[in-house]
Amino acid sequence: MLIPIPPDSKNYLTDAKKGDRNLWILPLLVLFSLAIALFLPTLNAMTNSPQLLTDPFVQKTTATSVNIVWFTDFPGVDHRVIYGSNMNKIVGATTTKLSRTREDQQSRFGQQTKTDQIWQKPTPRDIWRHEAELTDLVPETRIPYQVFSTRNDGLQISSDTFTVSPAPKPGKSLKILLTSDHQMMPMTAANLQKVVETVGQVDAVFHAGDLVNVADRASEWFDDNRGGAFFPCLQGRAHYELEKNGRKTVYHGGKIIQYAPIFTTLANHEVMGRFGREDSLDGEFNDPFPRKVAEAIYQQKASEINPDNSEVLRDRWLMDNSFNSETYEEIFTFPESTSGTKKYYAVTFGDIRLVVLYVTNIWRNPNLSLNIRGRHQERQADINQPENWGHGQHIFEPITPGSPQYEWFKQELNSPEFKQAKYKMVMFHHPPHSLGGNIVPPYTDPQQRLEQDATGQITVKYEYPQNQDYIIRDLVPLIEAAGVQLVYYGHSHLWNRFVSSGQNHYTHYLESSNVGNSYGAHLFPDRKRQVPENYQEKYAAIGDPNGLDPVMPNIAPLVGENGEKLPYIASNDISVFSIFDTQTGTVSSYRFDTREPGSPAVKFDEFALKVN
C-alpha cells in the first residue's frame, strides 16, 4: 500500500532511534501509518497502486530475535520494520540485489501470456531483497510487525500487520507443515489454502525442496501471471484458477510464512546449469556439467581463461560452466550451524533437531530412445559432440565418506544439540525409500560404458550399481544408528511411507510431496517403471528398490479400481499435506479432493514417533 511520507519524517524517525527529544513523534507516526493502512487496501485495489513484491516472511529465529525478509522490484531509499507489543520499535533493513534473476520466452510475467510474446531470450530482471533483524524479543511471546519500503519518488509502501515470535523453547507444543515439490503445480495453491483451513496457523514449514521449476526465472518465485508463484501461494496472495469437472475454483493459498519460519532444502530444481549456455532458461536449467568435467576443460584452457591465475576468476568460471544454486542461496537466510553451509545445515526448533542435507542429482529422462539425452544413455546425435552430453544423472554434492558434507553430518549426529533433542529429524530431497519413479536408478555416480555394434556405431551408456547407492550404503546406517525418528523427503510427487525397525528403535521414512501433481506409483505389475532390461544392472520396475514394504494408511486409505486398499496417493486430482504435532509426537497426513472444492481435507494416516 502507498503511504505519503510526512514532512521530515525520516529525520524524526532517525532521531527517535537515538532517543532524543523527538521521541514523542514516533507513536503519532505509528498511529498515522496504522490509520492509513486500514484505508489504503481498498484504495490500492481501485487505483492499482504499486505493491511490495512479496509480503514479509520469517527466516532465522533465535531465542530473542527473528529475521524478516521481503522483496521489491525497486531499490528504494529506505526499508524498515516497525514492531513490538506497542509497535514502538523501528529497525532498518539491509538491502541486496539478486544477481541472476531473469525472465525469458517461457515466462508468464506481465503482459506475456504465451511463449515468445515479448521476450525471445533470457533478460535480466532487477529484484531487491530486504532483511531486518528484530531483537530483544521475549521467548514464547508473539508481537506484531509491519514492513515499509520507500520508493525513489518518495512514496512509501507498507505491508499489512502480522505477528511473529522468537524460536520456541523445548516443551513448546508446535504444529509443523511438511511439504515439498511445489513447482507451480496446479493444486499447490489449493493445498496450502486447505492447510490453513484445516489446522489453522502452523508454527513452521519444513520444505523438502523443488520450490519452483527454474530457479533463475524470477516470476516463478514472485508473480507468475497464472497466479501460482511460490511466495504468493505461501502468503495467501495467490490467484490460481483450477478447473475440475467443468467447474472453476479460485484458490489463494494460505497466509503461512508471514507468521512462521520456513526451512528449505536445496533440491534439483533449485540448481541451474551452465550459465548462459542456452538461449532459454529451461535450456540452461537442463544443461549442468559435473564439476569434474568443468575442471578438466578449465585445465586445458586455463592460460586462455585465466592468464593471471586468479582464484576468484577460476571459481567463478567453474561455477558458470558446471552448475550453481546462486538464486536459491540469495533468496533465503539459513540457520547458522557449526561448519554447516547454505547448502546443508542443522537447527533446533522447540523439541526438534532438524538436519537438512544436500542430497540431489540432475533429473534425466527415463526414456530409452537413442534420440533422448537420458538417465541411461547419451543422444546418438551427440556422440561426437561431448560438449552436448548430459553425463547421466550426476550428483551435485558428494555425500560419501570423507566428503565435507558426510563428515559434517557425522559430527552433527554426535553433537549435544542432536543427542539431547526429543525429536531427531533429517530432511533431504532424494528418496531413500519410495514407490515413485525417481528412486531409480540408484543414487550413485553414473558409470560410463561405451558399446560398439557390428556396423561400428558407438553408444554411450550409463550404469548405476545398486550396491553403491550412497543414501542406502552411507547415510541410512548413520541415520538409524543415531536414533533418527523421522526422515522426510520428496521428489516423486506422491505420498507413501515406510518404517525400518531396529533394536528398541523405529525410523520412519515419509514422502509427502503430492501437492499439485503426481508421476505415479509403481507397486503393481501393470504399472512398471521405465527401466532398461538389457543393461548389466537390474533395476527395480516395481516396489521400493531398497527393500521396504510401504505402510498402509491406518485411517482412511484410498481404494483402487479393483477395490484394493492403496498404500500410497499418486493422483492429479487429490493433493496431500502432512502435519507434525510435537505435543503428541504424531505425524498426520491429510488429503483434499480438488474435484470437490467445498469438501474438507480428510485425515487418512497418522503415526507416532517413539521417544527413547
Image: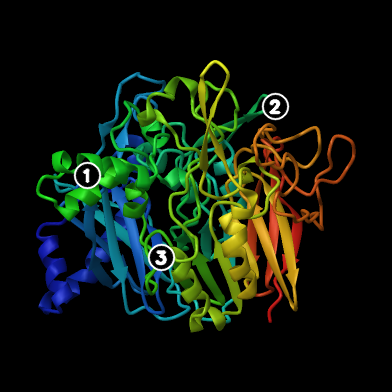
Q: Which residue is mark 3?
A: 404
Circle 1: element type: loop
Amino acid, disc 3: Pro
Q: Is residue 427 left or right of residue 523?
A: left
The local secondary structure at tag 2 comes to loop
Which comes before the other along the chain, label 1 or label 3? Answer: 1
- Is residue 279 shown above or below 144? above
Question: How far from the left and from the top, in percent, is residue 193?
Answer: 57, 48
Q: Position of residue 563 (x, y in %)?
A: 90, 39
- Alpha-carbon neighbours of circle 2 within 10 Å: few (<14), some, or many (≥20)? few
Residue 164 in the figure: left or right of residue 603:
left
Picture quadrant where residue 502 is located: bottom right
For the residues labelled 2 and 1, the Cα–Cα distance comes to: 42 Å
**Colour style of the rendered protein structure:** rainbow
User: In this orientation, which residue lies closer to the viewer: 79 or 288?
Assistant: 288
Q: Which residue is mark 1?
A: 74
**Residue 245, numbered label:** 2
Q: Amino acid at mark 2?
A: Asn
Q: Amino acid at mark 1?
A: Phe
Q: Disc 1 and disc 3: Cα gap in Å?
A: 39 Å
Secondary structure state at the residue bearing disc 3? helix
Does residue 300 show up? yes
Q: Bin the neighbour count of mark 3 within 10 Å (Cα to Cα): few under 14, some 14-19, many 20 and up.
A: some
Of residue 462 and residue 197, the one placed in the foreground of this image is 462
Q: Quadrant of the C terminus?
A: bottom right
The answer to which quarter of the image holds residue 121 is top left
- The location of residue 353, given as percent across then percent down, is 53, 73
Residue 358 screen position, x and y as percent: 47, 57
Crowd around label 1: few <14 · some 14–19 · many ≥20 (10 Å): some
